[in-house]
Image: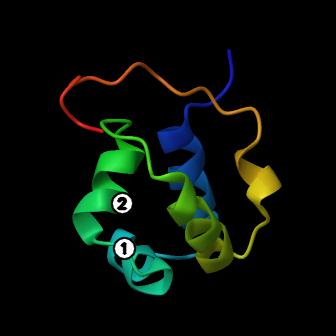
Amino acid sequence: MGETFGQRLLRLREAAGLTPAGLSEAAGVSRMSVSRWERDAQHPPAAELAALAAALGVSLAAFDGVRWPEKKNKNIP
């Protein structure tokens, strides 16, 4: 069935040797955002995918083929 975005992000973060706080600092996003994304509670804005990829040392292609689960809270963009 393939990884969700959150599963892939967590795997890439750990492979890069980063903590959630380290990834948030390197990508210029909040620690809470990283947590939400890794739990698949929220999808990252497209503009932040490039920052995540750069912070993880991967290309955007690293996120190809991920499953985007249904939003758990329809009020969260």
Task: Mark 1 or mark 2: name the one nearer the start of the chain.
Answer: 1
**Vertical relation: 32 (above or below) 7:** below
Q: Is residue 47 left or right of residue 37?
A: right
Residue 13: x %, y % from top left = 55, 64
Which amino acid, mark 2? Val
Query: Could you say whether the residue bearing mark 2 is in a helix, strand or loop?
Result: helix
Quadrant occupied by the C terminus? top left
User: How far is the residue under mark 1 from the one under mark 2?
Assistant: 7 Å
Q: Is residue 74 left or right of residue 39?
A: left
Residue bearing the label numbered 1:
29
Which amino acid, mark 1? Val
Badge number at residue 13: none
Residue bearing the label numbered 2:
34
Q: Residues within 10 Å of mark 2 (few under 14, many from 20)?
A: many
Q: Closest to the observer: 39 or 74?
A: 74
Asked which quadrant contains residue 28, the reply is bottom left
Residue 55: x %, y % from top left = 60, 78
Residue under the image location 36 percent in, 73 percent down = 29
Q: Closest to the observer: 41 or 47?
A: 47
